[in-house]
Image (tube, coloured by chain):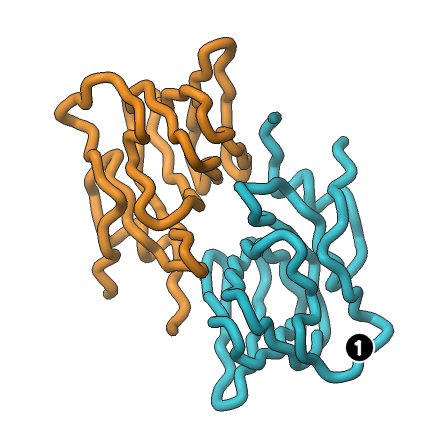
Chain colours: A cyan, B orange
Amino acid sequence: MEPVNIGQALASFDALWSPRILTTVNDYDVRVAKVRGEHLWHSHADTDEFFLVVDGELDIALRDRTVHLGQGDTFVVPRGVEHKPSSERGAHILMFEPSGTSTVGDHHEEVPDHVDATTGHALRRP
Amino acid sequence: MEPVNIGQALASFDALWSPRILTTVNDYDVRVAKVRGEHLWHSHADTDEFFLVVDGELDIALRDRTVHLGQGDTFVVPRGVEHKPSSERGAHILMFEPSGTSTVGDHHEEVPDHVDATTGHALRRP
């Protein structure tokens, strides 16, 4: 097990809405992603989802409000809660969630071409 | 559920080696701590432990080497592995581990006065 630097991990890929698995903790992933524009409405039936904004700004729309997150802000979307992340100007984010959790959840609208429906990609180590 | 800013959370307490629970994700805690000086040798029999250095520098001594972590570095101590965190100049760290995990693990040397043996304290929200 070696340390992984978040900045270096983020510098190793360009794809948007396509998380990389930084490391695993028991049966959870720590993932990082670059985001810009709109994700899609979805929910995770069986798990909460943790977001940390490493830099930039992230909005998480819920059905009754939108949560605005800036650098250093953290937020947990509870299981079963529909949400739609978006970022007008772009953001780098870190997520904790159980390994195998899909980026588009268990219930979601049609997946647009720019969104990667994935359980996370391996990080290419420098 | 409201957002929590890591910087504001860290500004809300001064105690060293005494983690605050930032939020929970399923049955896991996200904790933040201020550290300086030496923690103690310990291990967690049943869980990995994730560290992220928010700022400063953290050393994690293992029995066969010491891992040096700077800002943005992440490291996972695997379950059962003896480790001793320390920070000569101080650090702010974020941890991810199952709720109820003790800061001194299941096996540890004598707990010095400056180390808080705890499963994490509630964050006093501003």
Picture quadrant where residue A1 is located: top right
Picture quadrant where residue B102 is located: top left
Residue at the extreme top of the image, as rendered: B64
In the rendered image, residue B68, in percent from the top left (x then y), is placed at 50, 22
Residue at the extreme front of the image, as rendered: B46
Q: Mark 1 lies on which chain?
A: A
Is B97 situated above or below A43?
above
The residue located at (69%, 63%) in the rendering is A102
The kind of residue on which mark 1 rests is Val
Picture quadrant where residue B74 is located: top right
In the rendered image, residue A82, in percent from the top left (x then y), is placed at 57, 81
The residue located at (50%, 36%) in the rendering is B71
Q: Is residue B38 visible?
A: no
Mark 1, residue position:
A111
Q: Can residue A56 be seen in this view?
A: yes
Is A123 situated above or below A90?
above
Residue at the extreme right of the image, as rendered: A113
Label 1 Cα neighbours within 10 Å, binned few <14 / some 14-19 / many ≥20: some
In the rendered image, residue B65, in percent from the top left (x then y), is placed at 51, 11
The residue located at (54%, 68%) in the rendering is A46
The residue located at (17%, 27%) in the rendering is B114
Q: In this view, does B111 lie to the left or right of A25?
A: left
Q: What element carries label 1?
A: loop
**Quadrant of the frame with the N terminus of chain B:** bottom left
**Quadrant of the frame with the C terminus of chain B:** bottom left
In the rendered image, residue B109, in percent from the top left (x then y), is placed at 25, 17
Is A4 situated above or below A33?
above
Q: For the image shown, how many numbered marks are present on the structure? A: 1
